[in-house]
Image: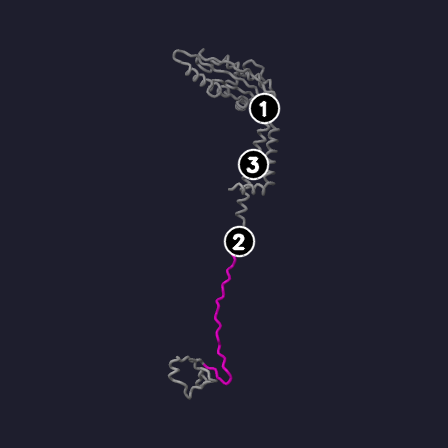
Amino acid sequence: MRSKDCLKRIFKNWRIIAVILLATITVSLIATSLQKPQYVARGRILITQKTSDNLDMYKASQSAERLAMLFAKIIKSSTFFKDVLNSGFPIDKSYFPKGEKDSREKWMEMVNSRVSTDTSIIEIDVYHRDAQEAKRILNAIIYNFSQKSKSYYNLGDTVGIVVLDTPLVSDRPVKPNFFLNIILGLFIGLVISAIFVLWQEQSGSQKKPETPAEPQIPQTPIIPEEKIWQPEAGQIPGPEIKIPEAELADAGPGPEMINDQGQNDYYIGGLKIAK
């Protein structure tokens, strides 16, 4: 499809496209307003691995990176969640649902942990409607790692945990992301508009009636005009008898042949004889 054709279709259906974009943006704004604002507390910890005679620096760094990836997954486990709640920090336990399944889903939604590329640094984010509550939960996570980390692995004192960044809370809510939701609503509106315009053009081309072919008028054959012999005065019409000119010349005019007015037509008993 050429760009000119696309522009023509857009200008032709600009009202419909504008309505669809307005509708999707409105829905995204309503969904954004219904979400409760949340703050985020961020912190970072470093996992180290001690070297030994059988473990050089390179292998030790690789081992620390694997442990960091393991710890990042352990943070979202239900066992670690219970240890955080029972760590002694004044955490509001009523914020979490009473059901086991719902409480796990709430914890996994609240906490986000990831490992920096090619490092053993774990970045931890905690989202909460209360900024101070998010900070307390993150402090409990870091404390639980530093005090009970040995219960999650069996490597003794060869593994160390270093707090790189203490919890830092955002000044403003980070969720929901207003601008991101607007852009997402605009993108969805454009996709829906493109699908609708293509569907409309396709359905219109299918319903377009075919132009009937012009009926072909048969040509009337031209019949040559027949020359009808009209008898002259005093002549009796009769069937025309054709005699070859050679025989007529040999016979010559006789008493039975009457020439009328010196013409080359001969009559015998009222019958016209043509050469």
Q: Residues within 10 Å of mark 1 (few under 14, many from 20)?
A: some
Q: Please say if 267 is above or below 135.
A: below
Residue type for callout 1: Val
Q: In the image, residue 82 lies at what x, y percent?
A: 52, 17
Asked where in the image residue 171 lies, by quadrant, the reply is top right
Along the polypeptide, which appears first: circle 3 or circle 2? 3
The disc label shown at residue 190, or none? 3
Report the residue marked by disc 1: 174
Choose mark 1 or mark 3, whichever is in front: 3
**In 3D space, how far apart are the residues under numbered discs 3 and 2 (Cα atoms)?**
35 Å
Residue sitting farthest toward the bottom: 255
Mark 2 touching mark 1, by CB under 8 A? no
| Magenta segment main secondary structure | loop
Mark 1 touching mark 3, by CB under 8 A? no
Residue type for callout 2: Thr
Q: In the image, residue 59 lies at what x, y percent?
A: 41, 16
Find out whether residue 53 is within the magenta segment: no
Report the residue marked by disc 2: 211
Quarter containing the C terminus: bottom left
Q: In the image, residue 200 lies at what x, y percent?
A: 55, 43
Q: In the image, residue 142 lies at what x, y percent?
A: 53, 15
User: From which residue to which does the magenta span run?
Assistant: 213-238
Choose between 135 and 229: the one closer to the eye. Answer: 229
Decide if residue 249 is on the left or right side of residue 206.
left
**In 3D space, how far apart are the residues under numbered discs 2 and 1 (Cα atoms)?**
61 Å
Give the colouring mode of the picture: one colour
Choose between 67 and 101: the one closer to the eye. Answer: 67
Q: At numbered mark 3, what does the secondary structure look like: helix, strand or loop? A: helix
Q: Please say if 182 is above or below 202.
A: above
Residue that appears at 38% across and 13% down: 54
Residue type for callout 3: Leu
Asked where in the image residue 85 lies, by quadrant, the reply is top right
